[in-house]
Image (cartoon, rainbow, N blue to C red):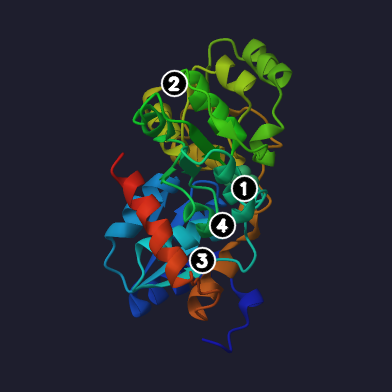
Amino acid sequence: MLNIDWNSLSNDDLYTIAENLKKEKNCFILAHNYQNMEVQKIADYVGDSLQMAIVASKTDAKMILLCGIKIMAETTKILNPDKKVLMSHFDADCPLANMKTPDDLRALRKKYPDAEVVCYVNSPAALKAESTITCTSSNAEKIISSIPEDKQIIFVPDKNIGAWVAYKNNRELIMFDSYCYVHEQITLEETMMMREEFPDYSLIVHPECSLDVCKEADLVCSTGQMIDFVKKNDRVIIGTEIGLYDQLKYHYPEKHLVPLNLKMVCKNMKKTNLQGAVRALAEEKYEITVPEIMKQKAKKSLDRMLLFI
Ligand code: SF4
């Protein structure tokens, strides 16, 4: 396997090698909804952060290959401490997750010592370890509403999801100024123009978009919830990273779907390609490890989140 001339292989060759390797190594492949379609095709499960976390916690495979970004592979490792967890690309990481450090969060906690800390899942294990509970875009609202009204809440790291759940729950949240560059760039003006161009389409957006854009949408939800919406609706504007639109067009060619904006491309998610993913599995490269103390603390935060599914 190590002497393969990888560049000479077609996609069909790579799909066959991936299938054989999965059986040989007892490996389960998870891919995020934002991955390229060619990568999604080798996955045993494709989903959003929460769905992947749930599936990862249940598989009995010996090895997991995570096609996505580093923080997702860390979450998978924390939930599967005895399994070998591989990443599909050595430096696919999330800029949002790294805008603030654990020291920044400790400083904020010092300022608000009685506050509960809710940490969006797109964060490094070190930040989760400093938090009370993790949340995803699909359960953030529920988790915030479960916290007593007289408790202050620090919400990290995404200010846009924070602003959306604060608006929906009519709560004040203490936040950093961090954001996802892919979703933050979409303006209200661009969104209104799409509304005018496609007046009989529903608009669904991810809560990492700005509050103005979210308020204009018919539904604000996770990518997993977007897929459920498209199953039941025929004309939809998709307001999230373009990988989800590609996936929906592939599975539902008969539907009328348009992307909110073609510039919603996450360079980090797109670092993984088919050859890279299969090679990572063949050579068992890019194994993820999380320091023990951090793993234990982050797991508590993740376990609390899993009660809200
Ligand atoms: S889409 Fe945004 S939040 Fe998701 S990985 Fe890319 S930068 Fe991070």
Give the distance between the C-alpha atoms of the residues marked 2 and 3, in whole angstroms: 49 Å
Foreground pick, 46 / 249: 46
Measured from the top left, where is residue 31 in percent x and y?
47, 55
| Dot label at residue 69 | 4
Give the vertical position of 30 relative to 150 (above or below): below
Q: Earlier in the sequence, mark 3 or mark 4?
A: 3
Foreground pick, 136 / 42: 136
Foreground pick, 218 / 117: 117
Residues packed near mark 3 inside 10 Å, few (<14), some (14 to 19) or many (20 plus)? few
Give the distance between the C-alpha atoms of the residues marked 2 and 4, in whole angstroms: 30 Å
| Dot label at residue 12 | 3
State which quadrant residue 183 falls in: top right
Measured from the top left, where is residue 239 in percent x and y?
58, 29
Q: Earlier in the sequence, mark 3 or mark 1?
A: 3
Residue beneath disc 1? 107
Q: Residue at x 38, y 34 (%)?
A: 143
Q: Earlier in the sequence, mark 1 or mark 4?
A: 4
Left-right relation of 198 to 40? right
Give the distance between the C-alpha atoms of the residues marked 1 and 2, in whole angstroms: 26 Å
Do the residues under discs 2 and 3 have CB atoms within 8 angstroms? no
Amino acid at dot 2: Asn
| Dot label at residue 159 | none
Residue beneath disc 2? 169
Left-right relation of 107 to 48? right
Q: Residue at x 61, y 30 (%)?
A: 209
